[in-house]
Image (cartoon, rainbow, N blue to C red):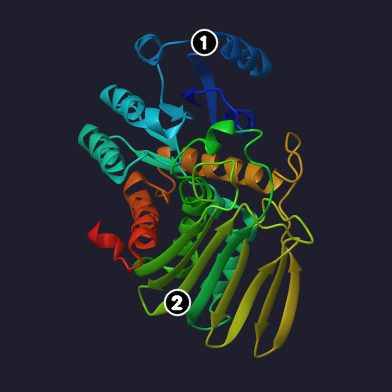
Amino acid sequence: MLKGALIGCGFFAINQLHAWRDIAGEGGAAIVALCDRDAARLAQVAAQFGIARTYTDAAAMLDAEELDFVDICTTAPSHRALVELVASHKLPVICQKPLAPTLEEAEAIVTACEKAGVPLMVHENFRWQSAIRAVRGVIDSGRIGSVFWGRVSFRSAFDVFSGQPYLAEGERFILEDLGVHALDVARFLLGDVSKLTATTKRVNPRIKGEDVATALMEHEGGVTGIMDCSYASKLEEELFPQTLVEIDGTEGSIRLGAGYRLTVTDADGTEYRDVSPPLLPWAERPWHNIQESVLAIQKHWVQSLNGGAQLETSGTDNLKTLRLVEACYHSAATGLPVEPAAL
């Protein structure tokens, strides 16, 4: 069994620790040490998950422990120093998104891991939701022919700031926190992006960053894509945290709608399928779709470390998604289309 350590015991880390415990039960990997600068929080989480070895200093932990990998679940400003520290110990690292506050820092992180010769995966988990995987499965089957248009949409009025109050303080918000997921899903389903035009808006006066963003994208291969996300949309039904998807192909279409209803139309007619995510024993609605994707991506990480899979969301791959985020900000500021690869 692989032995890992987790750095950062905050809001989202609880989901990751639950998933690691499930994976340990299957004999894949176990978290054997925890690190957090907040000693009280560290003690509470360690007790919750029965992890005896705890540290308030990451360097001390890495010097003391014999590990196979490290999971970094802190906020973005701390990522570079921590990833570089882990890489200096020649340990594989999985890191929460966004990988870094700037594209330059993210590139430095990827370079550090490449020079150290260690795998780096970004915890970009939306593409691992079972409903999103189901959409990709239909595309790959060829059932709707060649895709020529698609939309990835996440619109909500859910109060994400109550659980993560720091989100209201940043000059950037929805594109970095949520748009990065939606843009990664767009890449996953429609292909890489050659050019995009974007707009942003701040509706909520109590936050500093943007809470609405829309991008029109030209994907390689001639596919047109739209990504739209909002935390200011008061709808008849609150769908948080569901991602809705529309795909049109030359032979049919796919719609992933509210309530995880997948509709596939082709020459033979229309099929309706329930692709609701499983409710894991430790999960709770409505977060269960994200929670099951956490388990899926961490299983993928273990498989890759054991030589059974190539990393989907490697650091190198994630740079493509981060360039889309930066391109959106550039385009929104200038009103001009941007080529992400040029950033």
The residue at the point 60 percent across, 85 percent down is 252
User: At label 2, which amino acid type do we have?
Assistant: Thr
Viewer-proximal residue, 200 or 295? 200
Q: Residue furthest bottom?
A: 267
**Mark 1–mark 2 CB contact (< 8 Å):** no
Type of amino acid at the residue the image marks with label 1:
Thr
**Image check: 240 left or right of 100?**
right
The percent coordinates of residue 279 (x first, y second) are 75, 44
Q: Nearer the viewer, residue 113 or 28?
A: 113
Which residue position is annotated with label 2? Answer: 224
Q: Is residue 192 visible?
A: yes
Q: Nearer the viewer, residue 4 or 222?
A: 222
The local crowd at label 1, few if under 14, some if 14 to 19, many if 20 or more residues have their Cα within 10 Å, is many
- 270 vs 50: above or below: below
Q: Quadrant of residue 275?
A: bottom right
Q: Which residue is mark 1?
A: 54
Image location (x, y in percent) of residue 42: 57, 14
Question: Residue at left 64%, top 30%?
Answer: 18
51 up-or-down from 104: above or below: above
Mark 1 or mark 2: whose residue is earlier in sequence: 1
Q: Position of residue 107 (x, y in %)?
A: 26, 43
Q: What crowding class fits label 2: few (fewer than 14 Cα within 10 Å), some (14-19), or many (20 or more)?
A: some
